[in-house]
Structure formats: C-alpha cells, structure tokens
Amino acid sequence: MQTDEKELIARILDGHAEDFGYFLERYSHEAFAIVVRLVPQQEDAEELVQDAFVRAFNRLDTFEGRSSFSTWICRIAYTTAISWLRKRRMKYLSIDDNPKLSDTEVDEAFDDESLIEDLTRAISLLKPDEQTLITLYYYDNRPLNDIAYILDVEPNTLATRLHRIRRKLYLLMKHGTNH
Amino acid sequence: MEQTTKDRALMKALAQKEPRQLPSNFAYVTMRRIKEEQRTEERRQHKLAIITMIAVTLVGVATLLYLLGDVIWQSLVSISLKPDGFALVLPTLFCLVFFALLNHWLSRHRTA
C-alpha cells in the first residue's frame, strides 16, 4: 500500500471522515466490477458496493495494510455480495465431472472463438465464487495470493479449483442447457 | 495455466460480461450515507452516555443513602432545630446552580 494511503487512513481514523472520498473515487469501480458479475440487478449491485464501503469505513481500524486497500475492499465487496446471494438462496447448476474428458479438448474449446457465445452462457451458469475466480484470474490477471485473500480460500487450492472450473465450464457449454 | 497466450475465447467471453458502470455521483451519495451513519452512531453513543451517567448517579446516591442514610438524616434534623441551621444552604445551592449553568454553557461552546 502507498504511504500516502496509509497517511490518509490515519487521518480518517483521527476524525477526518471526508478523506474517505479518495478511496471511494479510486476503488469503487473495482469493487463494483466484482459485485455486478454476481448480482443481476444494477441497483442491487450499487447498494451492495455502498454497503461494502460503509462496512470498510466502520472497520477501517482493523485494516492492517498486509494486503493492498484494493484487495481488502474487493474482499469485503465479495463477501457482502455472497451473503446477499445466500439470503436469496439463488440456485446454480451443478454438473458431474466427466473423467474421460481430456484437458486438451478443454484447452482447444477455450481457444475457439466461434464458441464465445456458448462460453458466455456457460459462465453465467457457474456458481458466484466460480465466476469470480475465473474473472479475477483470467480477465483481471490478479495474483493468486490476492484472489485467495478476496475469496478467503487457501492459495494452494486455487490451481485445482481453476482446473475443475475449466472442466465444468466446458461441460456446461456442451450440455449445460440440458440439465 | 498460461492464460496470456491461450484461452482467447474464454477471455473474450469474460470481456462480454464486462459490467455496467457506477453512477457518477456514487462517491458523493456513499459519503453522505457514511456521514449520516456517523451522526446516528454519535447520537446513540450520547444517549448511552446519558443513560450510564444517570444509572451510575442513582446507584451512587442509593449506596450513599444505604450506608450513611441515618447519619445524614440525623444531621438534617439537628441543623433544622438550630435557628441559623440553614444559613449555609442557600449559598451552596446558588453555587451549584451557577456551576451547572457554567458547565452547560462550556459544553455548548466547545461543540460549536
């Protein structure tokens, strides 16, 4: 974390609440990008990001600077969205793995640009944590340690999870609509 | 997993899901909510402080009366029997009211 951000946090904790505007301006779009992929309605996503920032403000004294502020607020936004989804008990497709499926087959499909529409549909059928994981890794190119912190999982399990999600995504793409 | 050189279709599919934008006044609206919540919390803390103060005062007075009730009562009775027994009471009351008003004025002046 940048030194001036540390100073700003110290100032906010000292009573200068208006300085929190800097973090809102700078990081709200990142947090929103995570939440809006999980929550279908724009208004709900905006409210959840707002809840996340209010929570971050109220718990600012617990921020120890071990991760960047961006990763910290993304984690809060993610957990806020997941709790919201759990309360609404949204259903997601589960699909059994096919042991006969080869990784080469999956890799080739993910490289075939004629399958983009099918892939887009299959992504929307993944569970929220799976969608977030592949987005953070493949699209945002975030380091695995940051992703593990945001999703609150062990970093050494991420490679396996990514591998499993790739296979699931392929199966959903091929058969998802029949389940 | 070398996602930079392969997975082109996956990358493009994820890009298609690129989210909508936050409204431009999002930071302003959120700051307003944070300040409102701060004010609500301050009011709650203030109420809690008053309730605690009243409770502590009541417990203190009750303890004092329980331990020294008889002594206080006997002192009041003996003072009231003397002709100039209450000579000190009026100035003391005046001082109490004066300091209470001064305290109130100082508190208002400090928060303003």
Image (spheres, grey):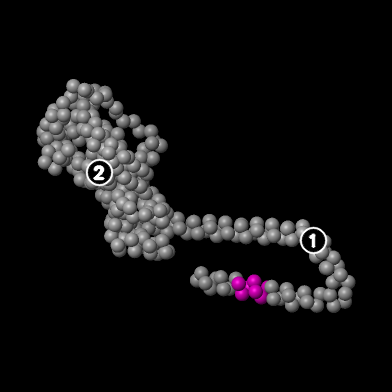
**Quadrant the N terminus of chain A occupies:** bottom left
Up/down of B108 relative to A31, above or below? below
Q: Which residue is mark 1?
A: B69
Is residue A124 in sight in this rendering?
Answer: no
Residue type of the residue flagged with mark 2: Leu
Residue type of the residue flagged with mark 1: Gly
Q: Which residue is mark 2?
A: A144
Does the magenta-highlighted stretch encompass residue A81?
Answer: no
The majority secondary structure of the magenta stretch comes to: helix
Up/down of A83 relative to B94, above or below? above
* Subunit ID for the residue under disc 1: B
- Residue at (23%, 37%) from the top-left corner? A159
So how many labels did they put on this image?
Answer: 2
Point out the stretch of residues depicted in magenta: B97-103
Badge 1 element: helix
Please rate how many residues cluster around mark 1, counting C-alpha atoms within 10 Å: few if below 14, some from 14 to 19, many from 20: some
